[in-house]
Image (tube, coloured by chain):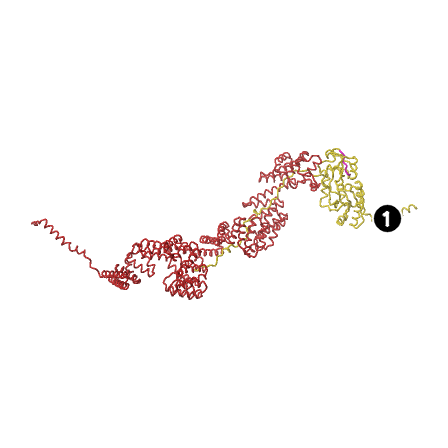
Chain colours: A red, B yellow
Amino acid sequence: MSRMPRSTPLGRFVVALAFVHALVGTSAFAQYRPPPLTESQRLVKEGDDAQVAASAAITSGDKKQAQEKYLKALQLYEQALSVEPGSVPAAAGLGTVGNALQDFNRVVEKLKPVMAANPTEVTLAYPLGVALFKLRRFPEAVPLLEIVSSADKPEHLIVNYYLGTYYLYEQRGDLAIAKLQRYLAQRPERLAGSDFQIHELIGKAHLIRRDPASARASFQRAQAGRPESHTLQMGLAAVLEMEGKTQEARALIQGLVSRFPQAPEPKERLGRILLAAGDVAGAETQAVALVKLGSTANAHLLLGDVRLAQKKPTEAEAEYRKVLQLAPGHIGAQIAVGKALQAQGRNEEAIRYLEAAVQAGGNNLDLWASLGSVNRRAGRFQRAVEVHRRVVELAPRLALGYLLLGADHFATGQWDQAIEDYSNALAAEPGHVAASKWLARALAHRARGRAETNRLDDAVRDLKRAFDLERSAAMARRLGAAMLQKRDFAGARMVLEQAVALPSATWREHWLLGYALHGAGEAQKSLEAFEQAAKLTEEPSDLADVSVGAALAEVELERVDEAVQRLSEPGPSKVARELAQANLPLLLLRRALSRVEKGEVEAADKDVDLAEKFPLSKQPDLARLAFFTKALVLTEQKRFTEASAALKRGLTPAPRWAVANTRALAEAYLLYRKEQVPQARKVLTGASRKPSPWQAKWIASLAAALHRLEGERAYAKGHFKLSEKAFKAALAGDPESDTLQHNLACVAYRKGKAADAVEVWRKLEPTVSTATLNLGIDAQERRKDIPEAVDAYRRYLASSGGPRMATVREWRDRLVSLYGLSASAADETPATETTDTETTATETTP
Amino acid sequence: MKTARLMMLGLALVCAWAPAAWAQKKTTLGVFLPTTLTDGQERFDFAEKLAAEIGTAMGQPVAAKSFGRYEDFSKAINDGTLDFAVVDAWAAVQLGARATPLAFAALSGETAQRWAVISYGKGAVKDLAGKRLALTKGAGPSDPKFVSNVVFAGDLDARRHFKLVSVPNVESALKMLEAKGAEAALVPLAHVPKDARVLFRSTKVPGALLVNLRAGSSLKENLPKLSAVAPFSAFVQIQDREFEDFRKLVQQGPPRRQPVIVESPVLRADTDALISSGDLNPVLPNFTTAMDVSDEQPDE
């Protein structure tokens, strides 16, 4: 095999170089050449050149040439796009030039497809977003502008301004402030002179946020170092209004009207303030002056509103139509025309007008809203609801649509739906003032209906929610009233105590509080509440209502006579009269029962007679109570046969106020008073099988009283065995009773156990005065110890009181006289003529 | 013969006169008031005037007889002479069933009077043990009972304590006391001399009575027509067992005192136990009327 001839090193290097060159040299050098432009690129380049020329023409002030150059550029970009429809540079250039020429529709038309293919492309999003924004197609514009804003490029800082103003328009204060702050952060120093405008906008955004302090700070920052600006001062006036300083705000605006006579805004604002305050004449002055200042849309709109307030809907309509001439499609004016037409009774025309406006205005919310409302006012509730549902569909995140639906349902009394609508409104915009107000009112309406159909729990629930939304005295009054109707006195008291502390409280809240306190057992406070209510009204029928309540409180305070007097003169209120009629016999009977308990029988009898003079036929339970009370009175008067008859009538059929054993207990008591002890005991035993806890004590007392009575009667008849048995039975229930021990000693004495008895009496002397008397009797009769007897009689007379005093005094005096015992210093009185007249010879035994 | 004829004539005259005499027998009022009235003439005048009044009231003549001694009075009753009488109550008791009490004769409106043990000497009643007590005489054995049971109310036995001296009337008792024929006297309090000492004063004892002594008398019915005759102010009809109780007291004395028990107070009805007071609540207003809501409508 032959070997290849060996080359020299230099030769080998040259060969290698030639080889490398042959392999790569040509093509590598070719990449560094500008690539050949495509047709589209060429056109774009030419377009860019034309655009630069246009800019230069603008800079030199040659608008005509600038226009021509822009148009040329536009043409070139369009051609480029037609050659390469997806070309981003062509689309971007077209957008920029189109916007410069304000040919926004073209921009939108040409850029949208390219943008769709490049959704994150900022160079496209910027011109397309601006064009859409200029066309007021905000829902489409804003997402694009947000893309641009997020890219945070200084050359696109204007989008932050756009977004800031847009969010202001949408009343989204926080977002507006964020965008405007970003604008301020990005703007070049040369634009700093216009910062005051941005601060003014930020101030407005703070007003939307209802942050008056921040708003004031922004307005003041905008105003600092600059001549007084009426727009800024207007902002400060809005701050004052938000702070509730209405008078100061009004004064400030009035000052602006004087200092800036040619500025329309202060006049317009003052006119609005006066109109809202009901000063229609003042508003008219401002509106007329405003129109004179310049026939602007706002001026005519204000004047139209003034005319409408003056009930001059025809003139108002004319003004609104002038607005539309000046600002065709002005939403507010179109809505106002609808209102003015409706105010003239031209409902159908108003509806047609707004229908047309809606058609022409696309999906303008305000027009839809107004159309629905006009339908509602015309009584076309179904159509109103349909239209307002459309508003909800268009702006589901706004409270507006729900508010309108709520108003429609409110107008037809469909409280459930209205409540749902307003709840939705609040869900969309928490804290919305109008939604809260009308939700509370709708709940109050529904609660009233529920209360009237006895759904009190539901009514109370509604009103609790309503009171949470509206902390007014009137709402508290409704809630308190529902609770009172439910007889939840403690709950009503709590609510009504809040109500009377509120500044808008009237006599009615105090009046209801009186009943709540009465029901809660606070009689004195109840009376005070009624007295307070009486101080807050001069209306005779109101005073009569209050007086009836006060009477009930007085009854609880044992001031029954005053109560009866009040109820006897119920005044001009029909309700008060009916209540008095219903309550007076009951109160009389309650007083009679109370008097029976105290043994004031004659007074009780009179009360029953008075009660029976009322027509009780409609109140059978009360009629039976009258019989029952009469039975107790007759029992006290020992007219037992009549008492039995009255008892029967009072308890047949069993009234609501009677318990299962009322009849048996009453009969047992009657028999006790007749001194028919065995019969009484038998009936009482039957009645006591299942006593209620509150009866147990009295039943035990009656049982003990029967034992005592039996013992006393048996003792009087000399039946000592029975007497002893009865007293012992009574003692078993009351082992500490001194009187029973004493009486048992008496029985023992009569049974021959005199010494035992004397011992007991001596022990009981400090507590039972009769024991002393018996010691005297024992001394005189058994032991014939006259001095000791006299001494005992003296002690008895000094310590006691009662029916035996005269007799014992006679005994003592006779013994003192017959046996020459000197009168003791302890004697309470010597024998006198006074005592002599009290007894006769036959009355010598106590 | 002549004598016989004269006797026949006399018999005939007697027979002719007797029915007329019987037919003309006057209704007679007896007055025995030895302790109530102190003067014999006063008793006589009273008897005459009262008889006239009764006569007027009954529409028939009434004769009056005034008695100074119980024996005479009692005898007249037994004889059937008297139809009715005004008599001291203690004496009426001694008449027993023969007298039916009709009315008390009230003195200054009082139907009862107090009695007093009086003396001119020192000491108390207990110091007069064994001393003489001048006492107006009635039936005799019954007299001490009146003193012991009524005047002393059983607290002192007069017969044991005193030596009782009977006198016909109050004036005799006072005279005897004055003459020291007795150390003490029992007289109605109204007749106690100013200078005498009252040792003991009784409770009130019924005074004079108008009694019926004959069945079928119409005096009771005519009682309301009877005018008062001085010194009495009125006749007050006796109620129920008023005199019977007095009679029993005189005869048997007061009952023995016995220990007295403490009577429990009457248990009053407790309405809380009888009535479900929760169902006696007053009628309250319809509070739903206070739930009114204004007519204000939303106008969004």
Give the percent coordinates (x, y) of residue A540. 55, 56
Please indicate whether residue A136 sits to the left or right of residue A7 in the image. right
Q: Name the residue under label 1.
A: B17
In the displayed orientation, state which residue is furthest to the right.
B2
In the displayed orientation, state which residue is furthest to the left.
A2
Give the percent coordinates (x, y) of residue A572. 56, 57
- Name the one closer to the observer, A47 or B268: A47
Give the percent coordinates (x, y) of residue B249. 72, 40
Q: Residues within 10 Å of mark 1 (few under 14, many from 20)?
A: few
Q: Main secondary structure of the magenta part?
A: strand
Above or below, B264 relative to B284: above
Please indicate whether residue A498 sits to the left or right of residue B71 in the image. left
**Count of labels shown?**
1
Please indicate whether residue A141 sits to the left or right of residue A30 in the image. right
Please tell me whether residue B132 belongs to the stretch shown in magenta: yes
Please tell me whether residue B277 belongs to the stretch shown in magenta: no
- Name the one closer to the observer, A812 or A679: A812
Residue drawn at point x = 78 percent, y = 48 percent: B53
Is residue A570 something that shows in the picture? yes
- Name the one closer to the observer, A333 or A207: A207
Task: Read off the magenta span.
Answer: B131-136
Chain designation of label 1 = B
- Name the one closer to the observer, A655 or A296: A296
Is residue A374 something that shows in the picture? no
Give the percent coordinates (x, y) of residue B180. 78, 35
Badge 1 amino acid: Trp
Q: Locate the C terminus of chain B and report the quarter of the image it occupies.
A: bottom left
Element type at mark 1 = helix
